[in-house]
Image (cartoon, rainbow, N blue to C red):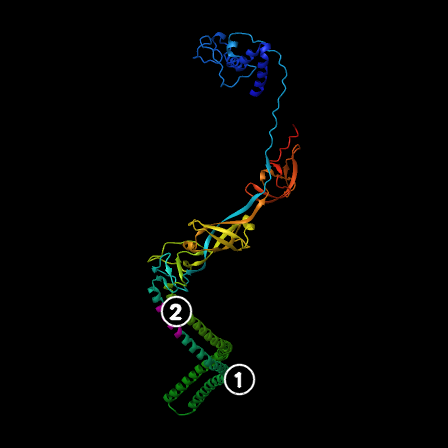
Amino acid sequence: MMKKMIVPLVVMGMLGGFLGVGEWLQQDAWGSEPPLQEEHSASQQKPDQPASEANPPDKSPSEPSSAEKPPQQPDSKESPKPAGEKPAAEVSAGKPAAEKPTEKPVEKVEKPAEKPTTITITPKPFKIEVSLDGYLEPRDAQEVVLKPQVWMDWEVVSAVKHGAQVRQGDALIQFESKKLTDAITDAKAELRAAEIALQLAQLDVQWAERVQPIDLALVERTQKRFTEDFDRFFKVKQPLDRKAADLLLRRAQHLLESEEEELRQLEKMYKADDLTEETEEFILKRQRFFVELAKFFYEEAQKEHEETLQLTFPRREEDLKTDAEIQRLRAERAKTSLPLLVQKAKADLEKAQLARAKAQERLDQLQADLALMTLKSPTDGIVYYGRLSAGRLSGPEAETLRKGDKVAPGRTLMTIVKPRPMVLVAEVPEEKFHAVRPGMQAKVEPKGLPEVKFSAVVADVDRVPVADGKFRARFTPALDKEADALMPGMACKLKLVPYVKSDAIVVPKSAIEQDPLDDEKAYVYLVVEGKEPQRQPVVRGRQKDNECEILSGLKPGDKILAEPPKKKDSAS
């Protein structure tokens, strides 16, 4: 806005000498506050307030009036006022604004276009470096792991310190062994009990094997005898018993009949003889008693005979049949179970043998664990309290073991490290995997000893990632006397140069235009004297930071634009 105002004002000022309005234009352009603010202030007065009581433009009630206030001089530091606005003093004095002369159209003067920045192609050295973080790893290191067989209570009595130099067979940790020796004593007693149980089981097997045939023969003999008795009962004994019952009944009947007949004969005889009545009475009385007794015996014989035929014989027959069935089942069971008893005895023997073997095994395990009560070094080296994790020493997991500390079985307590020889291991990010190849040289700087620098050669690179987006590479370091202070586990910084060219053509990435339809195509703009920049296809090579190698399309001495020209807006 201000630029649009200044240009016509300058032109009008130049014409003011012969038009007589130059001074007025300058005053109008650089005077005091424009009258628009006065009009705005006046418009804010209340409708019922007289104009004479209103505050003058651009004044507060505390400021002096325009008559008392001295005229202000234009300040060159103030921002120019618009050409269309009039000074506030002129408006307040009621002077009419002078008519402006008709302005002539002024031609717009265009500034000459700035020349674009160019680059002259000059071959120069170009190399790509790859930085990696690595660590020194011992080639020979053995972890010391407490691996007992059964014993779980491991209490430290003494232990070597971290960093101690040891030789193979030296004591590393001494544990408390009293509880273990007591357990070994108990295990020996259990073994003796198991051996006795085994001997008894062997005797049981021998007994079962010898007795089984005898028991089987006894079962068969009993079954045979019972069958014979059963058959004899129904064929011989039962008929005889029935006949005896009949005879007993008949004898009682006969006895009754005989006694009755004798009584009749006596009565008949006594009527005809001359015996006294007393004798007669005595004999008849006795005979009558015998008759009565015979009747009783006869009645009893009848009941017994009835009971024998109706109850005793059927029940005995039923019992014998039941006994026969039971005996048959017992014989079958015995024939089946007796061989099983032998098998059970043999199974008990195997169980006793297993129990004895377990008792012996536990005793052997406890005695083997007793040998671990003095944990010895498996090799020569330096003691590291910690473990090897992916080839790198993880550092001490805890302070040096002290007396009374408890150690969990299966834990890596320490690592015996041989400081020489060493290898250098680095994890290569996936985006740098292509740049690290076997045989490449690397410059190495230990982080803890930056003054001790050495070189290393890539020995191999894993083809399978060891972690998310990381591959492991191993280097063979070239260590001399100055590197004696280096120890396994120290971190290092590695630098490799996978690509170097002494006369490469390199341009800034900003000078390259990417084909919007084909990522493989790229262009630069050649600068030709007297012509518009020409679009030149190029083939890109390797890239580093903001630089890009050009393999073809440019030659030394060519000039190109530092940036592709901006495309003109089709609307303009």
Which of the pair 484/140 is nearer the observer?
484
Residue 495: image location, x then y, percent: 50, 49
- Magenta stretch prevailing secondary structure: helix
Q: Quadrant of the C terminus?
A: top right
Q: Which residue is mark 2?
A: 363
- Look at label 2 and name its amino acid: Leu
Q: Is residue 109 magenta?
A: no
Quick check: 276 left or right of 325? left
Vertical relation: 99 (above or below) 137: above
* Upstream in sequence: badge 1 or badge 2: 1
Residue 192 in sight in this render: yes
Residue 338 numbered tag: none
Residue 500: image location, x then y, percent: 56, 47
Which of the pair 537/133 is nearer the observer?
537
- Look at label 1 and name its amino acid: Lys
Q: Is residue 190 magenta?
A: yes
Vertical relation: 251 (above or below) 109: below
Residue 235 numbered tag: 1
Q: Foreground mark, 1 or 2?
A: 2
Quick check: 196 left or right of 320? left
Which of the pair 252/342 is nearer the observer?
342
Q: Residues within 10 Å of mark 2 (few under 14, many from 20)?
A: many
Q: Which residue is farthest front?
A: 557
Quadrant position of residue 61: top left
Residue 161: image location, x then y, percent: 35, 57
Residue 390 in sight in this render: no
Residue bounds of the magenta highlight? 184-196
Q: Quadrant of the N terminus?
A: top right
Quadrant position of residue 488: bottom left
Residue 454: image location, x then y, percent: 46, 52
Question: In the structure shown, which secondary structural element does the residue marked by tag 1 occupy?
Answer: helix
Question: In the structure shown, which secondary structural element does the residue marked by tag 2 occupy?
Answer: helix
